[in-house]
Image: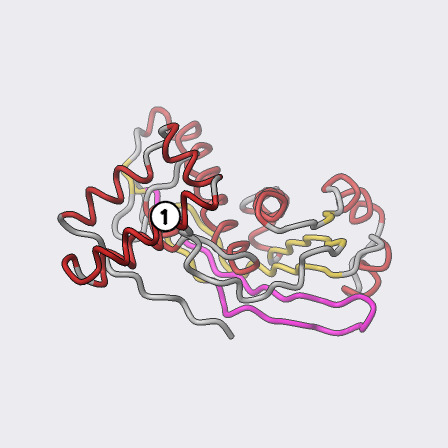
């Protein structure tokens, strides 16, 4: 199992380097596309290392390739994958449709970040579930003509902390089912999500429904990101920012 790399937080000159190198300027876009320019940049970092310290080099390496956390499971690449989300009965009644929202958000992330993945469409999955009782992942996977099933069991999901604060909490278990081998191929560590992580967000009772709708969208996407990022390399700092201040 891959271990998350520890990258020092940039300070002083490192902060200046980080800010300048991550701004979407023509030069930075060029550096990102041009391998020779990237090597030159790394060479300059090595020359500066004795004077500036190793943390500057680490920051520079992060700028060139910010995906410092490896995927925990890389087997979704070049596979036909069905994403199935199942809440318990109480959750399905209280938060109607949340299973489809989570599955849709996870599919979107996988489509964006996993190379050559083929995803079973949400409509195809919904149509089958409307006409069949789910008895096994094997039967479902074969019906979807899938190689793998990403099975998401949502054990807990709520949007409120007390009566006057919006703060999402969720717990989920995620398994990868291999249809051909008829077995669970990989199980993620349990997903426990709190958003925002420190404090809830007060809301206006006069606009409770609209504010809840906006918050629910954000929280579902935070949960989906925490699930899907296990399947591709990603930037730990961007993930930390999203977990605290989700925006699109």
User: Is 238 left, or right, of 57 in this rendering?
Assistant: right
Q: Is residue 17 left or right of residue 103?
A: left
Q: Residue at x 50, y 57 (%)?
A: 233
How far from the left and from the top, in percent, is residue 63? Answer: 35, 48
Magenta region, main secondary structure: strand
How is this picture coloured?
secondary structure
- Which is nearer the eye, 231 or 51? 51
Residue at position x 25%, y 48% in the image: 199
* Magenta run includes residue 186: yes
Q: Secondary structure at mark 1?
A: helix
Q: Residue furthest top?
A: 206
**Which residue is pictured at 32% across the width and 34% down the height?**
23
Q: Picture coordinates of residue 72 (x, y %)?
A: 53, 66
Q: Is residue 148 magenta?
A: no
Q: Is residue 191 visible?
A: yes
- Asked if residue 184 is positioned above or below residue 80 in the image, the reply reads below
Crowd around label 1: few <14 · some 14–19 · many ≥20 (10 Å): few
Instruction: Tally the numbered discs.
Output: 1
Residue 177 shown left or right of residue 48 in the figure: right
| Rendering quarter of residue 150 | bottom right
- Quadrant that contains the C terminus: top left
Q: What span is in magenta?
A: 166-191
Q: Nearer the viewer, residue 103 or 236?
A: 236
Name the residue tied to disc 1.
Answer: 40
Say which residue appears at 49% left-offset and 44% top-offset: 221
Q: Which percent across, then down, holds residue 107? A: 63, 46
Q: Is residue 71 above or below residue 112?
A: below
Left or right placement of residue 201 versus residue 132 in this view: left
Looking at the image, can residue 93 be seen?
A: no
- Nearest the viewer among 172 and 71 is 71
* Horizontal and vertical percent position of residue 187: 60, 71
């Amino acid at each position: 199992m891959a271990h998350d790399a520890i990258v020092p937080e940039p300070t002083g000159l490192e902060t200046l380097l980080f800010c300048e190198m991550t701004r979407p300027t023509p030069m930075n876009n060029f550096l990102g596309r041009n391998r020779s320019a990237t090597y030159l940049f790394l060479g300059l970092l090595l020359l500066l290392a004795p004077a500036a310290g190793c943390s500057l080099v680490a920051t520079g390496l992060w700028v060139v390739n910010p995906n410092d956390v490896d995927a925990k499971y890389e087997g979704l690449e070049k596979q036909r994958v069905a994403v199935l989300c199942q809440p318990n009965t109480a959750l399905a009644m209280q938060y109607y449709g949340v299973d489809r929202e989570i599955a849709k958000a996870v599919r979107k992330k996988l489509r964006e970040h996993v190379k050559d993945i083929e995803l079973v469409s949400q409509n195809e999955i919904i149509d089958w579930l409307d006409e069949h009782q789910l008895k096994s992942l094997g039967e479902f996977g074969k019906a979807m003509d899938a190689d793998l099933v990403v099975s998401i069991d949502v054990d807990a999901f709520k949007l409120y902390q007390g009566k006057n604060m919006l703060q999402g909490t969720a717990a989920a278990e995620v398994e990868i089912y291999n249809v051909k081998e008829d077995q669970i191929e990989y199980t993620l560590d349990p997903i426990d999500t709190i958003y925002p992580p420190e404090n809830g967000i007060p809301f206006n009772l006069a606009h409770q429904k609209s504010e809840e709708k906006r918050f629910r969208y954000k929280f579902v996407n935070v949960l989906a990101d925490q699930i899907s990022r296990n399947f591709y390399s990603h930037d730990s700092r961007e993930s930390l920012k999203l977990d605290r201040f989700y925006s699109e």
